[in-house]
Amino acid sequence: MKRLRDIGEDGLIERLLRGFSDEGLAVGPGDDCAVVDDGRGPLRLLKTDAIVERVHFEPDAVASRVGWKAAARVVSDFAAMGGRPERLLVTLAVDGARPVAWAEGLYRGIRRCLETCGGVLAGGETSSVPAGAPAVISVAGEGSVARGRVVLRSGGRPGDVLAVTGRLGGSIGGRHLRFMPRVEEGAWLAGHAGATAMMDLSDGLAKDLPRLAKASGCGFEVDPARLPRHRGCSVEQAIGDGEDYELLVAIPAKRWAAVAGAWGEAFPGLGLHAIGRLTSEGGELSGGWDHFTARRG
Amino acid sequence: MKRLRDIGEDGLIERLLRGFSDEGLAVGPGDDCAVVDDGRGPLRLLKTDAIVERVHFEPDAVASRVGWKAAARVVSDFAAMGGRPERLLVTLAVDGARPVAWAEGLYRGIRRCLETCGGVLAGGETSSVPAGAPAVISVAGEGSVARGRVVLRSGGRPGDVLAVTGRLGGSIGGRHLRFMPRVEEGAWLAGHAGATAMMDLSDGLAKDLPRLAKASGCGFEVDPARLPRHRGCSVEQAIGDGEDYELLVAIPAKRWAAVAGAWGEAFPGLGLHAIGRLTSEGGELSGGWDHFTARRG
């Protein structure tokens, strides 16, 4: 009998989506968000995500940081399309023995994320889980992006410069609970920089870059020496740790110099580093997180 | 230290929503769905929900039925506002040891629900859970309802007739996995019947009716002898079992006779039974499901 850990996350998603129609969607399953075009006004972005105790956070993590992470992951997906958050819905599934103060702290973190990044809480649900089972926080939401400004994973072309915002690696030390979604940066890259493809780095560059390249019908080259790393992190960590929530973006080569110059003025203190380029084929990176094989492969 | 089971589900939700703004929402947290008014076109309904293994379904349940239930619960919430499903997003959090066939069966059930009730799958996520932890399926979605046709929980008035669709009680015997969301019925009640308040019965009449009455600023009276019960169910079961997913609706008394007559023509084979009325104050029912106190109280 084949189990989920035998086929991995991408294999599962591919199977689950067989036979589904994406009728009525400008962009269906497979990108950071689904895109809905109502024929007028901005495009709408739809996203759902969940974090699980002992997978995405430890039981002793500060509750408000857990809430921040749950909301910020979804916000980061809007940012990865060039968009902004509008409305979030939260489902909290948790043991009845959990302190009330924990749930209140969680929501404090969600609220702080919305105050920081924009958007409102539109609703939620609560459910129990069996005694001792891990808590699950699911966040769904709606974002928006101006028509013509949406950036998919699939628009990259051979020769485009690949760049990442900020630095990579070592998120497990605590950054995975307090990262800042790159909302302004994503909108800028979509608007001023002519980004052809973009996504956020959640499972690590080694898992995520091949996804972007594949969606664009390209290969890729990365120069490991050029990877912007957090202090104390190895190249392997920068490639494979995951949960960086930085943006990976493809920029036409002829625009790169101008973009890199303008970036420094727009976002002082945050790097935008070229790490390689899209090619017509090939490319390999090992590492990254797969939920079901639970190995960095 | 106060725990969630000490304050119960409604107590928790009340605390969590303190301090949240519902700016930009026609209806914020607290109804079956949030309502977004874009100023033109139909109103949009937003909802998120989750089902948890060993709480909402047993490990040996048929996977396609679990998928049906996960999707149909959200569809039922759209129906409870008079609306229809448009797009669903699914997050599956599950142990990597789970058979691939189980996940495929789950999605088959989701797909069947969408084919039956309308709407498309817009996206999803997968996550692992720690080994042995229960699976969680979170479904979020967007529905729509014609402007002026939305029915909230809060519009009921003293004297309105309270009615329920179908029959109540005994869902645990299997109906909780294969119920039919009352989409056409909800739209009809919202449109032709002049419903003033409506909700779906998920936690049992004893829990849900007081919520509707409270939202409407009313009390209520119920005649237990008039409750439409499934074969073999006691009045206590009809009041307290929950997971009926029938509609509870308030109809102005002067319209009731005409509505009851027209219903039989519109929905032959499905009952619409008057069970009592909204009053200016008072009313009590005991029973119903609370997730955190985990007692029928």
Image (cartoon, coloured by chain):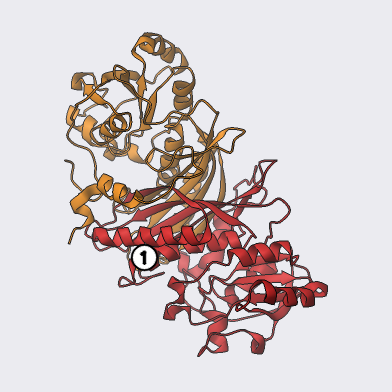
Chain colours: A red, B orange
Name which residue lies at 24% across and 26% down. B219
Name which residue lies at 74% across and 67% down. A193
How packed mark 1 is, by other alpha carbons closer than 10 Å (few <14, some 14-19, many 20 or more), is: many
Q: Write down the quadrant of residue B164 in the picture.
A: top left
Name which residue lies at 59% across and 76% down. A205
Q: Position of residue A146 (x, y in %)?
A: 68, 52
Q: Position of residue A148 (x, y in %)?
A: 73, 53
Could you tell me if residue B99 is visible in this image? no
Tell me the kind of residue under disc 1. Answer: Ser
Q: Is residue A212 above or below residue B153?
A: below
Q: Position of residue A158 (x, y in %)?
A: 79, 72
Q: Position of residue A149 (x, y in %)?
A: 71, 56
Label 1: state its secondary structure: helix
Choose between B278 and B109: the one closer to the eye: B278
Q: Is residue B214 above or below residue A164?
A: above
Name which residue lies at 59% across and 35% down. B39
Chain of the residue where label 1 is placed in the rendered structure:
A
Q: Write down the quadrant of residue A207 in the picture.
A: bottom right
Q: Looking at this rendering, what residue extends furthest in the right direction? A: A254
Q: Which residue is mark 1?
A: A64
Choose between A57 and B224: the one closer to the eye: A57
Q: Is residue B193 above or below residue B179?
A: above
Could you tell me if residue A251 is visible in this image? yes
Q: Quadrant of the N terminus of chain A?
A: bottom left
Choose between B111 and A25: the one closer to the eye: A25
